[in-house]
Amino acid sequence: MRGRKPTPTPLKLLRGNPGKRRLNDREPRPKLGIPPCPRALDAAARHEWDEISKQLLDLGLLTKVDKAALAGYCANYSLFCRAQGEIKRRRFQHVTVNPKTLTLQRNPWLIISDRAEMKMKQFLIEFGLSPASRTRLKTLEPAAVDPLAAFLAKRPKRRR
């Protein structure tokens, strides 16, 4: 398959169907819900699972069949956190000395951190949760407007 990946219908609906193309009325609609957390995830990944799964469910973006994608995100989140901890523990050494060749090399934890961050970003985009992808989403109900802010925005400014 070539070209862009198709956007899931729930994301198209949240974005307001910007292309105004016909929506797939035969797209599978798995039941909304939080899938069971895989036992293979460590404590940090399980904590992130609990946090993000509730938020995704509230947005109507998480179904029982999204277990693998959510697990991939959480595992990379945990790996990213561990790598960042190792970098801090080594006092932010971005370059290390290879003991065999006595040459400078990039800190391996920095490489692990960068790769985990890239993978996390890909999963976040899939769920519509990166800052850029979120700007294309529209909620079902408009956000509550602060009455005072609306009043102040409509008032004409006085000249001095």
Image: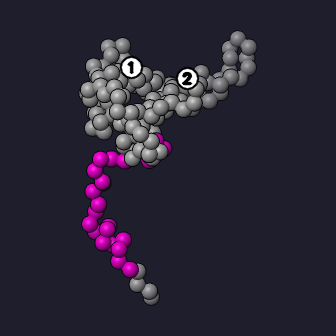
Q: What residue is rendered at 59% in x and 21% in y?
A: 108
Residue 91 locus on image (x, y percent): 55, 31
Residue 114 locus on image (x, y percent): 56, 29
Q: Is residue 146 above or below residue 156?
A: above
Identify the image quadrant of residue 93. top right
* The one of 79 and 109 positioned closer to us in this rendering: 79
Q: What residue is rendered at 30% in x and 54% in y?
A: 143
Identify the image quadrant of residue 22. top left
Answer left or right for 19 relative to 51: right
Would you call the spot at circle 1 few (<14 residues within 10 Å), some (14-19), or many (20 or more)?
few
At numbered mark 1, what does the secondary structure look like: helix, strand or loop? helix
Q: What residue is rendered at 44% in x and 45% in y?
A: 20
- Quadrant in the picture for the N terminus: top right
Q: Amino acid at mark 2?
A: Met
The residue pinned by badge 1 equals 68
Q: Is residue 127 visible?
A: no
Q: Is residue 148 magenta?
A: yes
At numbered mark 2, what does the secondary structure look like: helix, strand or loop? loop
Q: Is residue 90 above or below residue 158?
A: above
Nearer the observer: mark 1 or 2; the answer is: 2
Please report whichever mark, 1 or 2, sits nearer to the chain's N-terminal start. 2
- Quadrant in the picture for the C terminus: bottom left
Would you call the spot at circle 2 few (<14 residues within 10 Å), some (14-19), or many (20 or more)?
few
Answer left or right for 111 relative to 60: right
Identify the image quadrant of residue 78. top left
Q: Which residues are magenta?
A: 131-156
The residue pinned by badge 2 equals 1
The answer for how far apart the CA atoms under marks 1 and 2 are is 22 Å
Q: Is residue 57 visible?
A: yes
Q: Is residue 42 above or below residue 8?
A: above
